[in-house]
Amino acid sequence: MSAVWNYFKVNEDDKTKADCKLCSAKLSRGGSKGCAFNTSNLIKHLKSQHDNEYKEFTHASKPIQPTLQQTLARREKMSRDNPRAVKITQAIIEYIALSDQPLSEVENVGFLRLLYVLEPRYDVPGRRYMTDTELPKLHDSVKKHIHSLLQTSSAFSFTTDIWTSSVSPVSLISLTCQWIDESFTPQRAVLHAKQFRGSHTSQAIAHVFEEMLQTWGIPKTSVHVVLRDNAKNMIKAMNDAGLPSLPCVAHTLQLAVHEGLLAQRSIADAIAVGRKIVGHFKHSALAYSRLEDIQGQLNQPIKRLQQDVQTRWNSTYYMLQSLIEQKRVLGVYMSEHELPDYLTTHQWALMEKTVAILAPFEDLTKKVSSYDALASDVIPAVTVLVRLLNRETDEDHGVKTMKATLLAAVKKRFSDVETNPLYFISTILDP
């Protein structure tokens, strides 16, 4: 870019004009399209109107003669098998894998400029080369490393799930392995995330699961337990495969809370109204802009209302929480604008009580979904939930049906945790 742009900027309203930063004069850029633009008028203006700055410009524009050695160093590209080039290429594919970047990143202009500044002699491989050569090499290297880690144990726990991709109508099945190594350190690795073709019958699931174990050379006798969801086909699949399994605690909590929220019509109605209000702001940039203005006027942090997702109960919890936090802001907004629906004083009270009752469920969901979650956490947590739900308070007015349903659902769905050896032994052994 010409040094003359240190003294000018492109006019925001008319891209064919440039504004002088020194005197605000508006000058033509010498054309109507990008390829025809030039800096002749800008330089003439600088020369006639700003003598000192023109001298600075002419001095800055003088080419600096590079040495022969510098020129050759910049022009001579490293071969692909050059040790430094190999190291850079490996770092690039690791960066792409670890940060979930697309392989097209190697064609990104900004990324290419960065690499050129860091190492001008490096010849960046294209996307096809990275896809066909470097990615398989990285996959094989990581797989070999994981395989060596698996040799440090003879007992493994697994987590598996089947879901549909959010970007294409493709079903995927995952297999995550957890184990304790020789130094008694917990380890984990995702062994598979592969396409699941055909119907999700128990027979098909059992067959695919056994194939995944065989790929890693893990015999069924080394399977300590498989964590899965509560779907009947998944339960039967593990039974058919002769593998011990347990339901995912987070998914079980999802089912219990879902029962509770639907048990009381008044609470379900309040949630539905809250959902409409959040939807109004989600689909209107103008409405959200005004909401943010009101937040600023009331000296409240700028926060978005949370939209819930029916498959995740805690998203409903977060939605109610965000509405309660913005109650005052929403009141001001409603005094100026129409909303598709509104919450009554009674409904606001129901929402506040619902959030208070669901808070322990949210704490447990986060705990059992964390990276370092333990089986020994389940019995104490469920025991606390039951005691809290059994406790009667003056705040129960209006939410008794929901609370009673939650208690019954927790007792039913976690009825065997205290008698299941996988849970009670881990609880006893955990210091």
Image (spheres, grey):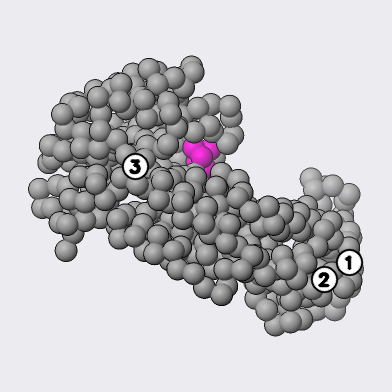
Give the image quarter of residue 353.
bottom right
Please say whether residue 407 is visible from this viewpoint. Answer: yes
Q: Position of residue 284 (x, y in %)?
A: 80, 56
In this image, 45 relative to 82: left or right? right
Circle number at residue 337: 1
User: What is the C-alpha distance between the residues marked 3 and 1?
Assistant: 56 Å
Crowdedness of circle 3 by 10 Å Cα count: few (<14), some, many (20+)? some
Q: Is residue 383 above or below residue 104?
A: below
Circle number at residue 333: 2
SS state under label 3: helix
Q: Residue at x 52, y 73 (%)?
A: 393
Would you say the magenta stretch is mainly helix, strand or loop?
Answer: helix
Circle number at residue 90: 3
Determine contact: label 3, label 1, CB under 8 Å: no
Q: Residue at x 61, y 49 (%)?
A: 262
SS state under label 1: loop
Crowdedness of circle 1 by 10 Å Cα count: few (<14), some, many (20+)? few
Q: Is residue 103 rendered magenta in the image?
A: yes
Q: Is residue 391 rendered magenta in the image?
A: no
Q: Amino acid at mark 1?
A: His
Please say whether residue 78 is visible from this viewpoint. Answer: no
Determine contact: label 2, label 1, CB under 8 Å: yes
In the image, the segment drawn in magenta is 102-106
Sequence-wise first label, 2 or 3: 3
Q: Is residue 297 above or below residue 405?
A: below
User: What is the C-alpha distance between the residues marked 2 and 1?
Assistant: 6 Å
Q: Amino acid at mark 2?
A: Tyr
